[in-house]
Image: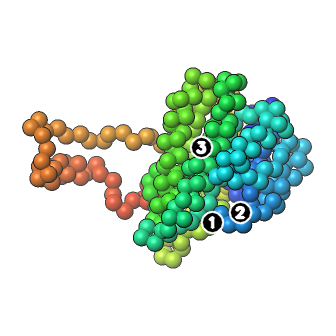
């Protein structure tokens, strides 16, 4: 028996890439899977039933249970239909994997409101809407697991991704609040920041030698490496593991801390702008993050 025997899992964005690998491994471990994917392009354009159905076909061909849902997570009715499909087709819902995403990268001064709103709608609002739809069922059964996908673009920062970075860090805040609010119902909520080569990461620029090196490093990190942590977090073995932020980088799993004070300085008579410049900042300087920091600075070594 697999770790998810008898459970029902909804995976958004499961037609391709990371989501597809998650759906396949959840099914392999015994879960019935709702495979959600409207089949849009990388920027949210178009639509195609093929990717979701192909994942479903592969699960069924291997003896598993799966159902394709083509709704957009950014649409309230569509997000609700993902959970309703799980309950109507398989009788319950045990875990929600908020993986769906699009990219509309642009350097900050060229980013349009439409590009901002589209990315926020899919990533942050989508995670809210699908999670909200599952919540009444989780409360009634006094169990459930939310697994949200964040990114080092939000946790650390990235160039040309203000919309994506804001959405992904917002998801961390959402997960933390869900974990606290739903603890009394026995419901868990965690985040994963994946490193994996997929259609999403294929849009990363590779113009400079440094960028090219980063892309080549990413290409060695396959999407299937993310799925085992998802299966664990969706399983009963993860009881008590909640309100955490993990990262998967090939064969390496990392636990992130939450923002915590690193330095403090008190001036009994109160601070003036001049005193901040002369005393506070020089004292804090050694503990301040570098202004140009991206994930390559935090993970400068090759994936293991």
Label 3 sits on residue? 128
First in residue order: circle 3 vs circle 2: 2
- Seen in the picture, residue 278 relative to 32 is either above or below; the reply is below
- Image quadrant holding the N terminus, namely top right
Q: Which mark is on residue 40?
A: 2
Q: Residue furthest left?
A: 269
- Seen in the picture, residue 51 relative to 261 is either above or below; the reply is below
Q: Which is more toward the observer, 293 or 141?
A: 141
Q: Position of residue 61 (x, y in %)?
A: 90, 49
Disc 3, SS: helix
Q: Which mark is on residue 43?
A: 1
Disc 2, SS: loop
Mark 2 and mark 1 residues within 8 Å of each other at the beta carbon: yes
Residue at mark 1 to residue at mark 3: CA–CA distance: 20 Å
Q: Which is more toward the observer, 195 or 91?
A: 91
Residue 21 appears anywhere in the view? no
């Amino acid at each position: 028996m697999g770790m998810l025997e008898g459970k029902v899992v909804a995976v958004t964005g499961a037609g391709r890439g990371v989501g597809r690998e998650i759906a396949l491994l959840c099914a392999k471990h015994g879960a019935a899977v709702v495979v959600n994917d409207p089949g849009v392009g990388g920027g949210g354009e178009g639509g195609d039933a093929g990717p979701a159905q192909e994942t479903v076909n592969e699960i069924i061909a291997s003896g598993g249970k799966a159902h394709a849902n083509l709704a957009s997570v950014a649409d309230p009715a569509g997000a609700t239909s993902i959970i309703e499909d799980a309950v109507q087709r398989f009788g319950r819902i045990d875990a929600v994997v908020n993986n769906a995403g699009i990219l509309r990268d642009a350097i900050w001064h060229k980013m349009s409101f439409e590009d901002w709103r589209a990315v926020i709608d899919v990533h942050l609002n989508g995670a809210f809407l699908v999670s909200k739809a599952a919540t009444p069922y989780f409360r009634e059964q006094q169990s459930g697991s939310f697994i949200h996908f964040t990114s080092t673009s939000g946790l650390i920062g990235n160039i040309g991704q203000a919309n994506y970075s804001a959405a992904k860090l917002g998801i961390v805040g959402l997960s933390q609040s869900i974990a606290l609010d739903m603890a009394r119902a026995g419901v868990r909520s965690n985040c994963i920041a994946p490193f994996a080569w997929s259609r999403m990461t294929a849009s990363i620029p590779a113009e400079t030698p440094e960028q090219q090196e980063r892309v080549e490093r990413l290409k060695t990190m396959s999407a299937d490496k993310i799925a085992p942590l998802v299966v664990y977090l969706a399983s009963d073995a993860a009881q008590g593991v909640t309100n955490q932020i993990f990262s998967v980088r090939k064969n390496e799993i990392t636990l992130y801390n939450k923002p915590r004070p690193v330095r403090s300085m008190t001036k009994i008579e109160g601070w003036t702008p001049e005193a901040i410049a002369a005393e506070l900042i020089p004292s804090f300087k050694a503990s301040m993050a570098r202004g140009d920091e991206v994930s390559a600075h935090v993970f400068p070594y090759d994936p293991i």
